[in-house]
Image: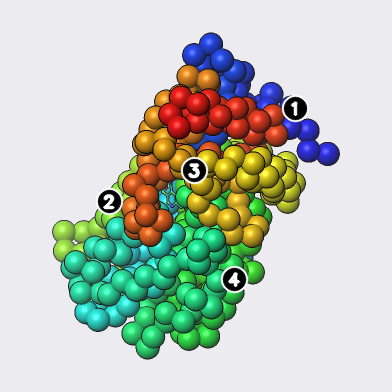
Amino acid sequence: MYDVEKIRADFPILARKVHGQKLTYLDNGASAQKPRAVLDAVMRGYGEEYANVHRGLHTLSNISTDRYEAVRGIIARFLGAKSEREIVLNSGSTEGINMVSYAWAAPRMRAGDEIVLSLLEHHANIVPWHFLRERLGVKLVWVAPEPDGSLPAEKLLAAITPRTRLVAITHVSNVLGTVVDVKAVTEGAHARGVPVLVDGSQGAVHMPVDVADIGCDFYAITGHKLYGPSGSGAIYIRAERLAEMQPFMGGGDMIREVTRDSVSYADAPMKFEAGTPGIVQTIGLGAALEYMMDLGMENIAAHEADLAAYAAERLAGLNWVTVHGKAPGKAAIFSLTLEGAGHPHDISTILDNKGIAVRAGHHCAQPLMDFLGVPATARASFALYNTREEVDTLIEGLELCHRLLG
Ligand code: PLP
């Protein structure tokens, strides 16, 4: 049984107050809070077991290396990868997607080649492709969502032409909560010979992910949204694509041998992990993913689906609120604007005074804001520890905003 009160007790920060009010943390889409298991892993990592990894032949370095390397296997299990050698550890999705842009896409793309993107994308899955547009003359082909925010796979697939070299698509929109059928996208794209990158920054947080079943070529995740430390993350890269990639960054840890005249590289995935990594952050991410898997990703998804349905129902009762994105089966992410309420920053400030944390702004999705015809929204994004009572608190907060601003 999913005991949300027991789960909340695992997150010490949820007991604190903000402006003298009980904290209602609804900014999970930006970053999630950390369970004690993660805090303990980080404390132990630095307080009892810390040394650099892969280098030393001493006890602490061996412990640290074992703990760090074990996370590769945990991530492989979490994502359903066939082998942990397909997991490249990094600092988060932004680094992962940039790595694919530099190390896989740039060497194989020419002027006039096309990358299919959707208007749902976060800047992290836009700007690295703009680099290729600027430097190589690659064309970005944009696919808009439907008016309800959904994005049918067929619509993305219809944008593929003989010049398409990649489809880069989010699994879940960080603004609208839309869930994209990335398996159908991948099947269709592969049938046309086109690889698929999935930005899983939000997707892996809210539902079970099985990259072997999806069949995608790249799947990027970011630790801080997965209840782990910031500065941790990984990207799954299918073995065939890994074999096609050039090293991205050069330095320690990624080489086999360096001489004055030559360099040879370690095998993948180490070849793509130059320099001292985020050792303890990654160990903390391992603890976070174990925590999620212990709760059960299906159970987390079911709990959040209940919150999403309840929030949608309560918000529908406020006729002065516009909910942007109403795709069926959407994740519990609600982007809102209030009639006559000025800038969403004002909403966020009023809610903050009530202890409610939401995010106001463009959410690093300016092309989507442009499509929606708004400069910004206030976004309430729910997590595995949120409750129906917190939905009620949000509604009361919005009613106050309406009274003060409307
Ligand atoms: N992609 C999506 C959909 C996101 O929501 C985010 C973070 O907000 C990112 C990418 C970037 O993640 P990070 O800043 O952790 O690299």
Whole-angstrom CA distance, mark 1 to mark 4, is: 34 Å
The N terminus lies in which quarter of the figure? top right
What is the crowding at mark 4: few (fewer than 14 residues within 10 Å), some, or many (at least 20)?
Answer: many
Whole-angstrom CA distance, mark 3 to mark 1, is: 30 Å
What is the crowding at mark 1: few (fewer than 14 residues within 10 Å), some, or many (at least 20)?
Answer: few
| Residue that badge 4 annotates | 183
N-terminal label among 1 and 4 = 1
Label 4 near label 1: C-beta < 8 Å?
A: no
Callout in the foreground (4, 3): 3
| Residue that badge 3 annotates | 336
| Residue that badge 2 annotates | 251
Q: Residue furthest bottom?
A: 162
Label 3 near label 4: C-beta < 8 Å?
A: no
Mark number displayed over residue 6: 1
Q: Amino acid at mark 4?
A: Lys
Q: Is mark 2 within 8 Å of ligand 1?
A: no
Residue 228, position as x, y percentages in the image:
53, 37
Say what secondary structure mark 4 lies in: helix
Label 2 near label 4: C-beta < 8 Å?
A: no
**Residue 306 visible in the picture:** yes
